[in-house]
Amino acid sequence: MFSPSYLHLFSGSSIDVLALRNALSEENITPVVKDEAESARLAGFGQNAPLMQRVFVHEDEYDKAKAVLKQLST
């Protein structure tokens, strides 16, 4: 599990997450992407929700990352 210093920013398809990761990197924010389907596949288990990923950012960068996400959604 993630340490409490990381906060959940977004959940969505791998395509949306890729766009968000690129936008965050332009702002020098490094997100942590959790892909449970890929983790399950690597461990030999079935996939629950393929293509669904979750994005976490450090709590110090959360407000800035939230603004980036808002710009992407407009």
Image (tube, helix red, strand yellow):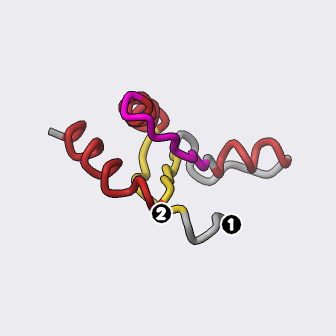
Residue depth check, mark 2 versus mark 1: number of the one nearer the observer: 2
Q: Quadrant of the N terminus?
A: bottom right
Q: Is residue 37 left or right of residue 73?
A: right
User: What amino acid does circle 1 point to?
Assistant: Met
Q: Quadrant of the C terminus?
A: top left
User: Residue 67: x percent and y percent?
Assistant: 25, 48
**Identity of the residue drawn at 49% across and 49% down:** 55
User: Residue 2: x percent and y percent?
Assistant: 64, 64
**Identity of the residue drawn at 65% across and 52% down:** 36
Q: Is residue 73 above or below residue 36?
A: above
**Identity of the residue drawn at 38% across and 28% down:** 26
The residue that disc 1 covers is 1
Residue found farthest to the right: 44
Q: Let me know if residue 27 is in the magenta part.
A: yes
Q: Compare residues 21 and 58 and report the one nearer the observer.
A: 58
The residue that disc 2 covers is 7
Q: Residues within 10 Å of mark 1 (few under 14, many from 20)?
A: few
Q: Residues within 10 Å of mark 2 (few under 14, many from 20)?
A: some
SS of the residue under disc 2: strand
**Identity of the residue drawn at 31% across and 49% down:** 64
Q: Is residue 4 above or below residue 25?
A: below
**Extent of the magenta region:** 26-34
SS of the residue under disc 1: loop
User: Residue 68: x percent and y percent?
Assistant: 28, 42
Residue 41 falls in which quadrant of the image?
A: top right
Mark number for residue 54? none
